[in-house]
Image (spheres, rainbow, N blue to C red):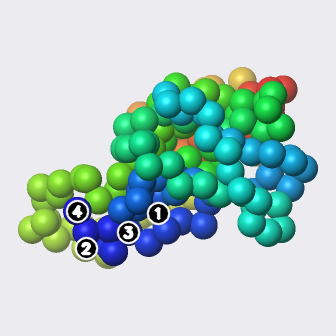
Amino acid sequence: MDRLRTPRRGCGATITDEGVHFSVRAPRATTVAARTEGGDHPFRYTHHGAFEATIASDTAGSDYQFLLDGERLLPDPASCFQPHGVHDVSRIVDPTGFVWTDVDWKGVAMADYVIFELHVDTCTPADETARTVPALINDGCTISPAADSAVLLAPERA
């Protein structure tokens, strides 16, 4: 597989020819490791609170967490996939593995688009948000969360 098409991400897990390259910024940690199905893999400190390692045995589909100072297990804050939610393991994703089947699709003409960004949870009480979102969906809106967020989903656990 041609890895030249997939540039190394600044943080998170990136598949390379050597394995999976992990990078995370943890300025308050003294040690960082990746806990994978193969055990704990120590990172090296690089600069300005950043740690990284390349693990040859990991592949797309493998789950991992970061172990800070030998005691605190955390998900990757730059993960592309959190299969069990934002407080659980992260999963390695190979973006080059997706096979496009709609290469001839031309899309919708820009003149036919209506784009409206609304941050419902930041401007309404929780009970009002619970009533607003279904009404928006019934009106034909597509609800697209920007990202999984531990702070938005469970601020008391963040």
Say few, some or many: other residues with alpha carbon within 10 Å of mark 4 (under 14 / 14 to 19 / 20 or more): few
Q: Quadrant of residue 153?
A: top right
Whether pointer 1 and pointer 2 mark residues with C-beta atoms closer than 8 Å, the reply is no
Residue 54 location in percent, x, y? 53, 55
Say few, some or many: other residues with alpha carbon within 10 Å of mark 2 (under 14 / 14 to 19 / 20 or more): few
Above or below, comparing residue 129 to residue 33 in the picture: above
Say which mark, if any, is on residue 1.
4
Going 60% across and 55% down the picture, which residue do you hit? Answer: 53
Say which mark, if any, is on residue 115.
1
Task: Pick whichever of labels 2 and 4 is earlier in the sequence.
Answer: 4
Q: Secondary structure at mark 2?
A: loop
Whole-angstrom CA distance, mark 3 to mark 1, is 30 Å
Say which mark, if any, is on residue 6.
3
Task: Pick whichever of labels 1 and 2 is earlier in the sequence.
Answer: 2
Residue 134 in view in this figure: no
Task: Pick whichever of labels 3 and 1 is earlier in the sequence.
Answer: 3
Taking the image as shown, residue 37 lies to the left or right of residue 71, namely left
Where does the C terminus fall, quadrant-wise?
A: top right
Say which mark, if any, is on residue 109.
2
Amino acid on which the number 4 mark rests in the picture: Met
Q: Nearer the viewer, mark 3 or mark 4?
A: 4
Given residues 136 and 90, the one toward you in this image is 90
Given residues 106 and 77, the one toward you in this image is 77
